[in-house]
Image (cartoon, rainbow, N blue to C red):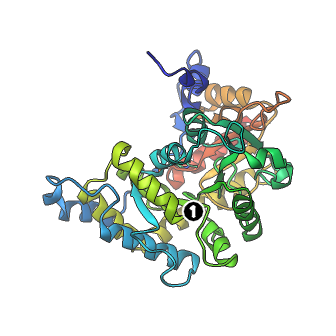
Amino acid sequence: MLNPRLEQLSDYAFQRLAALLAPLAPPPDLEPIDLSIGSPLHPTPQLLIDTLAEHGHLWNRYPPIVGTPALREAAADWLVRRYGLPAGTIDPTRHLLAVAGTKEALYLIAQAIMPDAKAGARPAILLPNPLYNVYLGAAVMAGAEPVLLTASAETGYLPDLDRLSPALLARTVAFYLCSPSNPQGAAADLAYLGRALELARRHDFLLIADECYAELYSREPPAGALQAAMRLGRSLDHLVVCHSLSKRSSAAGLRSGFVAGDPAVMAGFARLRSYAAAVQPLPVAAAAAALWRDEAHVEANRALYRQKFDLAEERLGGRFGFYRPDGGFFLWLTVADGEAAARRLWTEAALKVLPGAYLGRPDERGDNPGDGAIRIAMVHDLETTDAALRRIAATLD
Ligand SMILES: Cc1ncc(COP(=O)(O)O)c(C=O)c1O
């Protein structure tokens, strides 16, 4: 009855964490703080609440599968502003589809592009390791071989593009690149993005740039793959970028994002989506359009994260391999043993953190690049975050 490929999908990281901590209890005198899940807890923007309410009369209508024209235009305009693209680079009808959160889109796009074979061999999908697990699910369920590329401190927390053999590249169908990355917060620079795109074009695969953390940064705005494409000419061939309101606007519950890029891919993706994808209700689309057109709430959001990273630097700087991520809202701390640290932080400090290994997979030598790390989601308010950071500093060696 069941698709045997499902067996290759291991338990999600949070199920594994629940199993790890189930036999253990936190100290009764401490309020537990969950730092394991990257669910943004900053206040919901008033603009979202108001716009949803203003469009409350539209719940009775079926929405267009590709997104409303207003939302697609707002998203395309935002891309042009955010990345300084030449006006008109993104045609909202040819290059961009609204999606009900990028999670479903990241999964589904692999199903839209997968051939039976490439260069006479089994198709491969390149993935960073550690990774956002949905990429792996997408590759496995599409029938590709998932090829995990170590992204460790030695490789600048991004896959090493020089390690890809010609034979592998020949059968590669897609490369999921997360920048800024979850979990390590590393942003690829324009040179890296350009090289990845050149490889995609030379070897005829799709670069899927997951840029959902691109708006959360302390210092410089991270570069985007569309900027790299502009440097190479104006073509969007072999590239799609994925953006989300979940982190930018602390609106994970809205389920709203978009995918933009290669028009041929977008046409095929739209066709699959008309059979398989969730549509966004019209009030949601109206709220999403308003959020893409507003920067004030994003600046406030960023400022709060910046304050929390300042605090983290103060409390943890110089210990646990602390560094300030280029983007995103995670700390990626070095510890001797990630599971042991997670157990200890729960039993001694009432803190839930994610062992890095749960976000990675063992490589061909059996080494998991997430080993020896924990991921801390800096998603709480300032006061709670400070309490958590103090507890980490006092608990871990
Ligand atoms: C790297 C990465 N990509 C994509 C997503 C999906 O975000 P959403 O579906 O809320 O747009 C997440 C969510 O945590 C993520 O961490």
Q: Residue furthest bottom?
A: 87
Looking at the image, which residue is at 73% across and 60% down?
Answer: 196
| Residue 67 picture location, percent across and down | 33, 60
Q: Amino acid at mark 1?
A: Leu
- Is residue 209 visible in this depiction of the protein? yes
- Is residue 243 visible in this depiction of the protein? no
131 sits left or right of 75 in the view? right
253 sits left or right of 171 in the view? left
Above or below residue 158? Residue 224 is below
Image mark count = 1
**Viewer-nearest residue: 170 or 227:** 170
Above or below residue 202? Residue 387 is above
Above or below residue 278? Residue 91 is below
Instruction: Give the residue number, with chain letter if any, for mark 1.
Output: 216
**Viewer-nearest residue: 145 or 304:** 145
Query: Crowdedness of circle 1 by 10 Å Cα count: few (<14), some, many (20+)?
Result: many
